[in-house]
Amino acid sequence: MTSFTTHTIESAPEASKQYLQDAKNAYSFVPNLLGTMAESPALLEGYMSLAGIFDKTNLSETERQIILMTNNRLNGCIYCMAAHTSISQMAGVKADVIEALRNNTPIADAKLEALRTFAAVINESRGWPTEAQVNAFLDAGYTQQNVLEVILGTSLKVMSNYTNHVAETTVDAAFAPNAWSPKSENAA
């Protein structure tokens, strides 16, 4: 596999430096994903912008993490599963929800399980859910807006998961305690 550079603020292309500095200010380190994305300032800007937009949805932090982690698991992204497990823990997502997402088991809360199921449907069907699947999601208490927000979160994960796959991004020490390995049937 081609070796990709994980940039520091100093080594990054000029157009990526401020994004990496902002990440360092927010997290006290530059995550390897962002350092890798920095090679393409457009990708880094797109990812950072889309992540900020996704945070503006009317979905809760737990609901956003369900969408992100479901996609991470389905895409077999080792880096993002470790990172989002850590992010979910810091954000107060319940431990049983995190474990269900990591292990592909049902979430006890019926509404959150409907979201997990629908996020998987969007990923696995490549955006072609059946009418019954959309209706089941809506019947669980979600809206048409939320249908589109699941697509937004899925899009965000394509950017990060695919970058990590191509670059074989090393999991940061901060996320290493939450290392994850895909089961063979879920691996990309």
Image: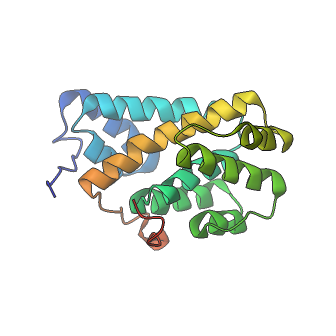
Residue occupying the point 61% across, 66% down: 104
Given residues 30 and 149, the one toward you in this image is: 149
Given residues 118 and 145, the one toward you in this image is: 118
Residue occupying the point 56% across, 44% down: 125
Residue 169 as seen in the image, left or right of residue 48: left
Residue 110 percent location from the top left of the image: 83, 56
Q: Is residue 12 above or below residue 73?
A: above
Q: Quadrant of residue 141?
A: top right
Residue 145 visible in the current orientation: yes
Residue 175 percent location from the top left of the image: 44, 64
Residue 25 visible in the current orientation: no
Given residues 172 and 120, the one toward you in this image is: 120
Number of marks present in the image shown: 0
Residue 6 as seen in the image, left or right of residue 108: left
Q: Quadrant of residue 46?
A: top left
Residue 165 as seen in the image, left or right of residue 25: left
Position of the C terminus by quadrant: bottom left
Residue 99 percent location from the top left of the image: 64, 69
Q: Is residue 178 above or below residue 169?
A: below
Residue 98 percent location from the top left of the image: 64, 64
Position of the N terminus by quadrant: bottom left
Residue occupying the point 72% across, 62% down: 94
Residue occupying the point 56% across, 33% down: 152
Colour mode of the rendering: rainbow
